[in-house]
Amino acid sequence: MKPNSDTSELAQEHESHHDHQNHHAYMAADFRKRFWIALVLTLPILILSPLLQELVGLREAIRFPGDLYALFGLSTAVFFYGGWPFLKGLFEELKSGQPGMMTLVAVAITTAYGYSSAVVFGLIGKVFFWELATLVDVMLLGHWIEMKSVMGASKALEELAKLMPSNAHKLMPDGSLKDMPLSELVVGDKVLIKH
């Protein structure tokens, strides 16, 4: 049990929980929007990808002057728009000294984007734009699903908390029971649980 907690503390906890839920709802909506836009941009990236064109045997049929620049432009949009949460997360994780998933994804997409861009502008090599775009898509989808799951779990816990009684049956030193608000219980109190 918590030592005496007053009503304003409980109100602040509830407001903090509500803000947290709103944050998760905003994040889920943001990941969903970024995912769909990045996915739409990924389709022409896949069509323009030299490796995929070669795999299906349509390299010469689909190729046109400036196709690598078009591929670069579409990939730039996916990198900056779809990849923004991961790039932002990279700086937040590094600032806190705790690199994690955002850092891993940001390093991967930045490496693919930087190297592929250099190839478009003269470096000899192959572009990895379709890998960049599909990685961004998969990670946005994963984070969108994760945020929805967190919101669902949070709502379930909130419903469960509503089932909690507001009073407890405190066992007094003389063996009698006294009904009292949960907020008045202190560590060490003995309570009777009825079911």
Image: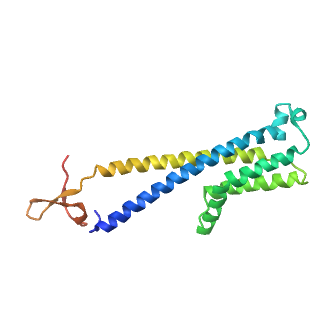
Q: In the displayed structure, would residue 117 be above or below residue 99?
A: above
> Front-most of 12 and 135?
12
In the rendered image, the residue lying farthest to the top is: 57
- Please give left or right for residue 85 compared with residue 186 in the image: right
Image quarter of the N terminus: bottom left
Query: What's the residue at 20%, 57% (across, down)?
Result: 168
Give residue 23's position: percent from left, percent from top. Answer: 50, 56
Q: In the displayed structure, would residue 104 be above or below residue 53?
A: below
- Please give left or right for residue 64 compared with residue 85 in the image: right
Q: Number of labelled discs? A: 0
In this picture the colour scheme is: rainbow
Give residue 119's position: percent from left, percent from top. Answer: 87, 52
- Please give left or right for residue 180 compared with residue 121 in the image: left
Query: What's the residue at 53%, 48% (across, down)?
Result: 146
Quarter of the image holding residue 63? top right
Give residue 19's position: percent from left, percent from top. Answer: 45, 59
Quarter of the image holding residue 14? bottom left
Q: Is residue 126 visible?
A: no
